[in-house]
Image (tube, coloured by chain):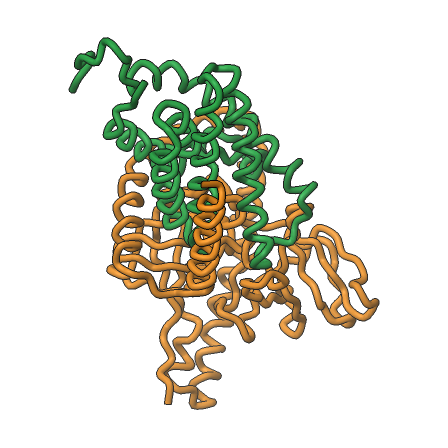
Amino acid sequence: MRNKRLFILMIGLILFIALMGFTLGRTRLTWPEKFLSDAFGTVQGTLYRPVGAVADFFRDLGRLSDVYKENEQLKQTVAQYTQDQIRFNLLEAENKQLKEDLHFTEEQKKMDKYRYLVAQVVGSTSNPYEKTITINLGSRAGIKPEMAVRTVDGLVGLVSKVKTFTSTVTLITDLDPSSSKGTPVSATFLGKPESFGIIEYDDVTGTLQMTKIDERDKPADGDKVITSGIGSLFPKGIIIGEVKSSQVGDFGLTYTAIIKPAAKFDHLREVMVIVVPEVKEP
Amino acid sequence: MNMRINRVILFAMFLVVIENSVFPWLVPSAWSERLLPHLCFIMTLYVAGFTGRHKAFMFGLGFGLLQDILAYGHLIGPYGFGMGLLGYMAGLASEYRNFTIGFFVWVVLIGGVLLDTIVYLIYKLFQITELQYAYAFYWQIAPTALLQLLIALLLYVPVRRFLVKQSLSSGEEGSE
């Protein structure tokens, strides 16, 4: 009798290891998975959003005293923004003219024009090792796997699984390239286009790190970090965060910067999926 | 003692929705990576205590897999495996002891720790997490197990009242 139980346990273990190995790193889903996720995702959405609105309301009440200071800051930012807008318009016109002169193709010109699909978050999970959120857009709305996802503040993650009406987004805190299923996020400093580094997430301290920074590009505190778009899935120019502190890296040849993320990764309500114009393969 | 298994399943589905949509908002930001209770697992333990090991096994397996599919990012199966196994073990344990609340407290605590340990080991095996066990225990497993205990105790009265068939008065009290 005892032997029979052990035997069944062993078979169960083998079956489950096989299942996990089979589902590891797969992007296509079968219809039962899609159906279940869509059904629960839709129902969750009807609860997640109202509850989120109420929770945010109470959180805002708690922050009411900061509003005055925040308003002051915003006024300054707007003043700076109008200045920048004028400069930007001039530069854009010039840039367009130069592209004309250099005979850029239509595709190359459109490379930087991203389309944003606004999605509502309809749920997050209680699994500590799969930090995913569910959004209410799926393949019907044109979502494809491995599209980048951001909030108004900054980069959040990557679409990992697409269902018909919902999709799953893996957060960048879960894309650590040192783990077996990670995706490297290549980053650069705003204003220093040659700089390059790779974003990692440190589970223990809960911060993002930018590693492998060349020693010529010594990071300064407060530098803005954006995606570089080189050799990775993320389109360029999405803000990731700003440098909090930096130190010399593991072998003394590179720098490592600790980054304060621009976006929050919990209590998300609304995200934007970035649709990059498709480049036709020759 | 027996349970109204249809109602239990409905209630557990409701709990899945609550767990993924309402619970994240109740936990403050600083604790959102530390308190991740599995409400269906608590129901699995109730099923184990009130009906027996085979039903608990099926229940845990089903809802574990459902949870895995909803959270699918890397792999499917850790919770299916863990909840199925622990449902069976809890059912086995409750066949030797009387089902008292003192006993159940221990089942929820130890079960919660074991479930998260199994899940941790699976992710460690596939090299998806790099955390040390001692850190994971302190950071997530222990607080989650304590919170699960609290939720289980809060659910105790409603579960007994609405989901368990009393042996004699098996009438339709409070039917839909």
- Give the vertical position of B66 relative to B34 (above or below): below
Picture coordinates of residue A193 (x, y %)? 63, 72
Which chain comes out orange in the rendered image? Answer: A
Locate the C terminus of chain A by quadrant.
bottom left
Picture coordinates of residue A241 (x, y %)? 60, 54
Report whether A226 appears left or right of B100: right
Picture coordinates of residue B32 (x, y %)? 54, 36
Report whether A239 appears left or right of A121: right
Q: Residue at x 33, y 61 (%)?
A: A29
- Give the vertical position of B141 relative to A209 (above or below): above
Q: Residue at x 44, y 43 (%)?
A: A125
Q: Residue at x 25, y 52 (%)?
A: A35
- Give the vertical position of B100 relative to A247 (above or below): above
Q: Quadrant of residue B6?
A: top left
Asked whether A278 or B3 is in front, the reply is B3
- Give the vertical position of B160 relative to B133 (above or below): above
Picture coordinates of residue A254 (x, y %)? 77, 68
Chain B colour as displayed: green
Asked whether A66 or B175 is in front, the reply is B175
